Image (cartoon, rainbow, N blue to C red):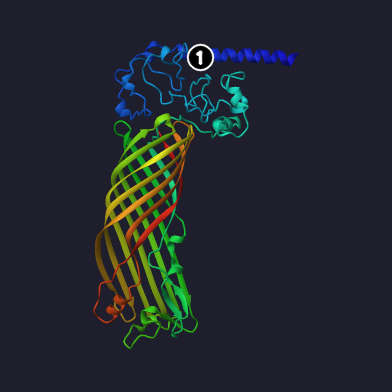
Amino acid sequence: MHRMTQSRIFTRFSSLRAFAACAALFALPAAAQMPMANADYDASGYVTPAGMNHPSMYQGGVVPAGMAFSPGMQGNGPTAFPGGVTPVGFMSGGQCDGNCGSCDPGFGSCGGISRGGLIGSCRNGDGLLGRGSCFEAFCDYWSIDPRYLGSNLHGLGSNLGPYGEICGLRWYDLSAEAVFLGHTQGVGNMAVTSDGSELPPNVVLTLGEANDGDELAAGVRLSGALICGVGGNVEATYMGGNKWSARAQATSDTNNLYSFITDFGTSPAGALDDVDESSLQSIGVESELHSIELNYRRRSMGPRCRFQGSWLVGLRYLEFDNEMQYSTFNSPARFFNSSDRVTNHMFGAQAGGDVWWNIHSGIRLGMGLKGAWVQNEINRSLTIDSNSIANTVINDTRRGGDLMGEFELKFIWQFNHSWKFRSAYYAIAAEDVGFGSIDKTTILSVAGGTAVNPSYVLDDLVIQGISFGTEYNW
């Protein structure tokens, strides 16, 4: 009997809290419901879903975010708020995620407050309006059902539940990600060193054993955006700082290592013998990436808000450095070293876009594509030094037009108004990229006293990997 009395008192107190909350909403100062004649929608980037009029078409007060659209309901919809700024979650029909409308954290047809995000009205089993409110049904709904994904998350008391609106346009001011990338190697798997001078050679070292791109190297991706008109913004993005390195070597206690430069010790007389009869031969490869973009992006909203999209145009610069080092050693009086450093400077115009699927309020999955035509200026510096060759440096430049593209698969989980978790998969592909190599013809020509410029090793480059980071909104 005592418990029943407590329950009645608690229910009555909860009802009073609900009534007080609703009274506070409709008791807003009259100024808050006055027409916003000076609202600059273009500067704010405001975008309405496809099929809905621009807010400048409405003349009247501001409709509270998440208010259900019920023209025939007294105290709600256009009847109570004639015209005015329509919220992004205004059209609740067809967008309900199981929590009473498209606008999770607002007043929906259930009348709940602060539904989404870190506040979580269902946290600790009690909403801000108390037990007995219509949220209780969702808080107690524990089965796994996609329609009630948000409610299940809050019902579990998660402080990391998604926050946001289905119709909230995707915006960010700053983003920062840790990026882990690998890349393809463009010089193949040529045999470099043999044990002994017999043919066919007993290969003990190949180029493929020093593939630096096999490992994921850490870098960063930083991006900032400024609103520029309706649905538009200017974005600046840097991705890079990734550095790769790999080394492989072969040794012989009997100085029995021979190089491909002399056809493994079988070349005619007069060839460079500094690279043969070695106790150690090694290959080292190093690479580095930098990418800068400046784009104008225009965003749009699909009907029912489940899908959003954007297109962009802009400029892109990508720098890819690759260096190959080859060394042989017999004694301090007999050695050979070469280093071929190739730097690709790719710059040009690009265009592209992305599509976002609003899986649930505050949870989004996106896919983006970019394509660019770039002018690739390849700067090469080849250094050769051995016991019979004085230190020699050969510099050369090659220019050509190439194509480059990027694919992105992105995931967003919004914590609150300002912060989001972001993860993505990136793949960048470019054709005719220069790689460092061991140019046999040039090395022999330098040894013979007449240097010949090295040929370029050009191949397709694919850089791919994953990222984890955050986005911030002012």
Figure quadrant of the N terminus: top right
Residue 450 lies in quadrant: bottom left
What residue is at 44 percent from the left and 82 percent from the top?
Answer: 200
In the rendered structure, the answer to whether residue 199 lies left or right of residue 228 reads right
Give the answer, above or below, for where 62 lies relative to 119: above
Q: Is residue 199 above or below residue 120?
A: below
Instruction: Tell me residue 238's x, y (percent).
Output: 35, 47
Location of mark 1 (residue):
22
The image shows residue 234 at horizontal and vertical percentages of 30, 38
Indicate the quadrant containing the C terminus: top left, top right, bottom left or bottom right: top left
What residue is rendered at 59% in x and 13% in y? 15
Q: How many marks?
A: 1
Which of 242 and 345 lies nearest the eye of the viewer? 345
Secondary element type, mark 1? helix
- Left-right relation of 305 to 128: left
> x and y percent of residue 219 in the render?
42, 51
Within 10 angstroms of label 1, few (less than 14), some, or many (20 or more) residues? some
Q: Quadrant of residue 86?
A: top left
From the viewer's perspective, tell me whether residue 164 is left or right of residue 153.
Answer: left
Taking the spot 44% from the left edge, 43% from the top edge, the residue there is 410
Which of 113/351 is in front?
351
Viewer-proximal residue among 449 and 360: 360
Can the viewer see residue 126? Answer: no
Residue 208's spot in the image, x, y percent?
Answer: 44, 68
Q: Is residue 52 visible?
A: yes
